[in-house]
Image (cartoon, rainbow, N blue to C red):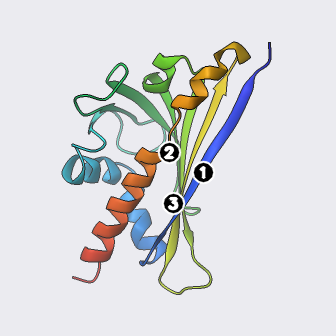
Amino acid sequence: MGVIRGEICHEFPVEAPASVVWESYRGLELSRLVNELMPHLVGTVEVVEGDGSAGTIVKLVFPPGTPGIGYLKEVFRIMDDEKRVKESDTLEGGFLHLGFDHYTIRVEVIDNNTLPNHCIIRSTIKYELENDSKAHLLSQLSIQPLITIAHVVGDYIVNNHNK
């Protein structure tokens, strides 16, 4: 019985500088934007502990009708303003409740070197199943919620950045 590890990645272009987009992803700002702009799509975020730096724990309550346990708790493991990287590990609920042994979300806001004042939001899911008998769970993985967040936040920034 082998371990299954993998990742799913998506890159979303945004017509705004990376520094501006990062301000919307760093710390607890993304939680505020999720609550304000997309509670019906993604859910609502509650701060359990912390100030948005590494070690902060948040609880995401999924919208009604979402399959599964209905929530997840995650801890921010990396919050790097210089590299514009945010990484969080699920502590309970979410995909762990479904049977995954490890589930990490990593978001990087990267300068687009070919287009000035443009950037890329790279969203990555890293997962682990400690037993290949759980391989059937892989069909439940989806990066779509992170794509939705990147799209909504990107549009919000483009529509509000120069105002």
Task: Bin the neighbour count of mark 2 within 10 Å (Cα to Cα): few under 14, some 14-19, many 20 and up.
Answer: some
Instruction: Name the residue at 49% across, 25% down.
Output: 95
Which residue type does callout 3 highlight?
A: Asp
Which residue type does callout 2 highlight?
A: Ile
Which image quarter is the N terminus in? top right
Tag 2 residue:
143
Tag 1 residue:
9
Are the residues at dot 3 and dot 2 in contact (C-beta closer than 8 Å)?
A: no
Are the residues at dot 1 and dot 3 in contact (C-beta closer than 8 Å)?
A: no
Mark closest to the chain's N terminus, 3 or 2: 3
Instruction: Name the residue at 32% across, 54% down.
Output: 29
Q: Which of 67 and 112 is in front in this view?
A: 67
Are the residues at dot 1 and dot 2 in contact (C-beta closer than 8 Å)?
A: yes
Which image quarter is the C terminus in? bottom left
Rendering coords of residue 59 (x, y %)? 33, 30
Helix, strand or loop at mark 2: loop
Instruction: Name the residue at 22% across, 29% down.
Output: 64
Rendering coords of residue 32 (x, y %)? 25, 50
Q: Can residue 113 be seen in this view?
A: yes
Q: Is residue 131 visible?
A: no
Determine whether, in the image, residue 64 is placed left or right of residue 20.
left
Task: Bin the neighbour count of mark 1 within 10 Å (Cα to Cα): few under 14, some 14-19, many 20 and up.
Answer: some
Rendering coords of residue 91 (x, y %)? 48, 24
Which residue type does callout 1 highlight?
A: Cys
Mark closest to the chain's N terminus, 1 or 2: 1
Helix, strand or loop at mark 1: strand
Tag 3 residue:
81
